Image (cartoon, rainbow, N blue to C red):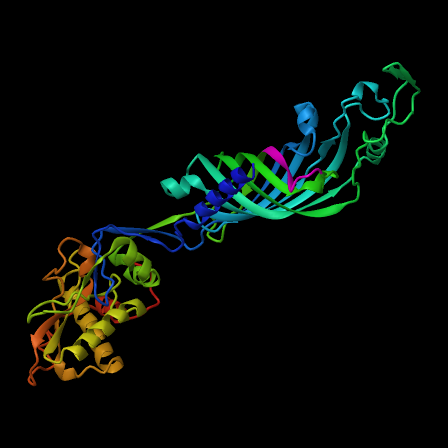
Amino acid sequence: MKKTILTFGIAAMGMMTCMQAQENTLTVPADTTLASNSYLLEADTIDYISDKVQNWYVGLSIGGSYSMGENTRFGNFFDMTRPSFQLQVGRNFYPQFGLRATLSYLPQRGRAEWSTSEYLEKYAQQDGNYDFQIGAGFLDGVVDFHSALFGYKEKRRFSLKGYLGLGAIYVFGFDKDKTDWLKHPTYKDCTVDGVHHNAGDALNPGYGYTVNTHPYWYFAGHVGLIADVRLTDAWSVNLDASFNGTDDGYNGMRYRRVYDSYVNLMLGAMYKFKNQNGERSVKYAHYNNKDVVDELNRLLDETADSLKEARNPIIVPYENVSYNEMLQTTVSFYIDKTFVTDAQKRNVKSVAQFMENHPNFDVVITGYADVQTAYPKYNMMLSQKRAQAVYEILTQEYGVDPNRLSMDYKGDEEQPFEMVNEWNRAVVFYLKPHTSAFKAEVEDKADDIKLNSHESNRLNQTGSKDTRRP
């Protein structure tokens, strides 16, 4: 029995440590390519789990508890089984793993075995049964086997969970009338082996059972399984089966054993509260790459190490680059905006570091606008302001020599990223050989474009960060 319990416990603990942490985790296609010092993703979409993972829940269960202490195997199973009640409060920190605390009230029945029960006085039950009570509290680690093995599914109807917990029990409420009689049992009015005994005569020494009736705390542990069936987003029902181990003296009797045990089988209901997002379960967020590139960059930065280990992305080094080549690093913009977000400034910084490490190259900063938004003359002005914004950060914040920079802008006349329209809201960088004649000033292609007053006001507001999300 000890080996069985130990094996089950080790297996349950192993499952807990093998969970995949999905809080703030990205699900990225295996062929995703990352440029060095850049988080430009070449995937169509990305899903990730929001950081508000799971809400609190409470549950109430009722069922039966069967003591496996001394002599109970000689009694009637149903007579030895007593009702049990449990309150639980918990929270899942990941879809696969959580913690819960339980409080239980467990009436129990112990037993003194009698080979001469037919001669016992009826003052106490002839079967030697006696009642006592248990209050139990545990802290459990709970593993959702379905989510761990088959992946998280928000609307899963059935799930099997396992738990392993430590706690304590408080034993009290022994039936003292019966336990005192068990210590000194008496005959009924009968004749045994030709000897007549009057009612109340004490049995021979050795037939008594001493039961320690003093209330006491005992250390305890348990393992169990929960079969959970989801009814609605808020409610579920479950069947909870557990094996509980504690001190040999918990039932008031000790008999050459290290521990005693009892088992519980309870049917319960669970109510799940809403979390900070107003949801009752884990939610996936789904974004297009370019529309929220700053948010994706933040998440990728936080999980860069695990992402590289999990997916082995291709890192594009800045080695063996050639003239007229476009750098892999791209600065992306919100729709109809020209300001550079904090996330995209990392990409601008990587260009500054590249230029510092490659003094034989100059860079042409080239702005673009996507062809499906606005119209050509407005997009030309928009791409100009995007290129200018990047130029100012490179020179003013990162100290790049202006003589090594040149600006150009294409509006929507050219689309460097033909596959995904939104990706063209960007500034890209082309390499040129270094020359002292390389100037930042270029011909203003937009000088002869006349915008009406509404267009001009709209363009003047494109640098504000207080705007709607794309």
Q: Quadrant of residue 328?
A: bottom left
Q: Residue furthest bottom?
A: 436
Horizontal side, residue 374 vs residue 9: left or right: left
Query: Is residue 87 within the magenta segment?
Result: no
Relative to 393, is 425 above or below? above
Q: Give the residues in magenta.
A: 255-266
Quadrant that contains the C terminus: bottom left
Total marks drawn?
Answer: 0
Relative to 313, is 217 above or below? above
The answer to whether residue 374 shows anywhere in this view is: no
Q: Residue at x 79, y 33 (%)?
A: 209
- Please tell me which residue lies in front, 224 or 156: 224
Horizontal side, residue 162 vs residue 451: left or right: right
Horizontal side, residue 233 vs residue 41: left or right: right
Query: Whole-percent x and y of residue 188?
Result: 88, 20
Query: Whole-percent x and y of residue 2?
Result: 56, 39
Query: Is residue 260 within the magenta segment?
Result: yes
Q: Quadrant of residue 423?
A: bottom left
Query: Whole-percent x and y of residue 33?
Result: 20, 57
- Please tell me which residue lies in front, 308 or 116: 116
Q: Residue at x 69, y 33 (%)?
A: 70
The answer to whether residue 251 shows anywhere in this view is: yes
Q: Residue furthest front?
A: 194
Query: Whole-percent x and y of residue 400?
Result: 20, 81
Q: Residue furthest right?
A: 198
Quadrant that contains the N terminus: top right
Instruction: State whether the magenta stretch is mostly helix, strand or loop.
Output: strand
Q: Quadrant of residue 38?
A: bottom left
